[in-house]
């Protein structure tokens, strides 16, 4: 316990310092979202004559919020299901179900997101639900496979040592295996988040709120300015979360090595 407490404070400081690496993308994102009218002269040449240069049908802050909500909800659900499934099939009693679990996790990557949306709309209607289902299925595989990889890399002698000091199977899982596998699991979550940020743009084709609304409006009106505005914000969001998760992974790895 004292050793754990000793490393907790440095790890907390490392986590806070992690934001320095993503501060510039964050500021650029906020600038583009809040003060995008200042870019009008630069975007004028990309806009058809007589068409609006800046997307004004909805605020960028509102669209970013809905976009992130879709990603957070879908990845939270995918993480819960994928991590639980990976834990179950990594136990001796569940090893026989590994091929089935892997096939189900691959389902989201097998079906294109547009196909999932088309299948989901008749069942749940237009709006956010089809997008959430598509993002959930798309996010399963990286988290599932990385959780399996992280759990499998825990050396048997470490687990035997934990059992030797009186830990039961659940204690070994929660206090030894999962903490050691956490950096690899976080990598899987990071991949799913980055994929979902980009994929969420197609949710607007079924009336889900998000930044895809700006991109689709640009495609429908041949307005490259709209496409650029939506695309740049999505790209900055992906960069922001990629940098943040990489910092978290580094902090966790440093904590394990210290």
Image (spheres, grey):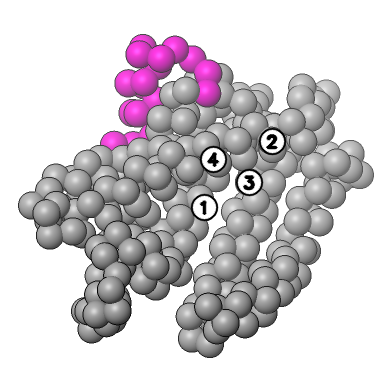
Q: Which residue is at 29% across, 70% downward?
A: 167
For the residue carrying disc 2, how many other residues have a C-alpha within 10 Å: few (<14), some (14-19), or many (20+)?
some
Q: Which residue is at 31% across, 53% downward?
A: 144
Distance (Cα) linking label 1 and label 3: 10 Å
Please give the range of residues in magenta.
110-128
Query: Residue 229 placed where, x, y %?
Result: 72, 41
Residue extending furthest toward the bottom: 258
- Residue identifier under label 1: 194
Q: Is residue 112 magenta?
A: yes
Residues at marks 1 and 3 touching, judged by CB atoms closer than 8 Å: no
- Residue identifier under label 4: 71
- Residue identifier under label 2: 65
Q: Point out the frontmost of discs 1 and 2.
A: 2
Q: Tag on residue 94? A: none
- Residue identifier under label 3: 234
The secondary element bearing badge 3 is classed as helix
> Which of marks 3 and 2 precedes in the sequence?
2
For the residue carrying disc 3, how many other residues have a C-alpha within 10 Å: few (<14), some (14-19), or many (20+)?
many
In the displayed structure image, the side of residue 69 where residue 224 appears, left or right: right
Q: Can you see residue 199? A: no
Q: Point out the frontmost of discs 1 and 3.
A: 1
The secondary element bearing badge 2 is classed as helix
Quarter of image, res 182:
bottom left
In the displayed structure image, the side of residue 9 where residue 192 appears, left or right: left
Distance (Cα) linking label 1 and label 4: 9 Å
């Amino acid at each position: 316990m004292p050793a754990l407490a000793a490393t907790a404070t440095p790890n907390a400081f490392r986590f806070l310092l992690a934001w320095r690496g993503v501060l510039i993308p964050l500021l650029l994102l906020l600038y583009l979202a809040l003060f995008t009218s200042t870019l009008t002269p630069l975007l004028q040449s990309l806009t058809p004559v007589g068409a609006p240069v800046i997307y004004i049908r909805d605020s960028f802050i509102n669209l970013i919020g809905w976009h992130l909500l879709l990603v957070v909800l879908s990845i939270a659900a995918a993480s819960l299901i994928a991590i639980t499934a990976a834990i179950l099939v990594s136990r001796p009693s569940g090893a026989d179900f590994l091929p089935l679990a892997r096939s189900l996790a691959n389902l989201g990557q097998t079906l294109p997101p547009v196909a999932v949306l088309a299948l989901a709309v008749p069942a749940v209607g237009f709006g956010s639900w089809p997008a959430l289902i598509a993002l959930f299925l798309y996010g399963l595989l990286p988290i599932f496979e990385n959780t399996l990889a992280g759990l499998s890399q825990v050396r048997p002698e470490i687990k035997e040592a934990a059992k030797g000091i009186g830990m039961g199977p659940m204690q070994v899982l929660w206090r030894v295996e999962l903490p050691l596998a956490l950096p690899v699991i976080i990598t899987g979550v990071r991949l799913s988040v980055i994929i979902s940020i980009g994929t969420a743009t197609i949710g607007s084709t079924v009336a889900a709120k998000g930044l895809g609304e700006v991109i689709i409006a640009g495609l429908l009106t041949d307005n490259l300015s709209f496409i650029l505005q939506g695309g740049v914000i999505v790209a900055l969001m992906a960069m922001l979360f990629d940098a943040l998760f990489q910092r978290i992974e580094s902090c966790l790895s440093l904590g394990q090595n210290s």
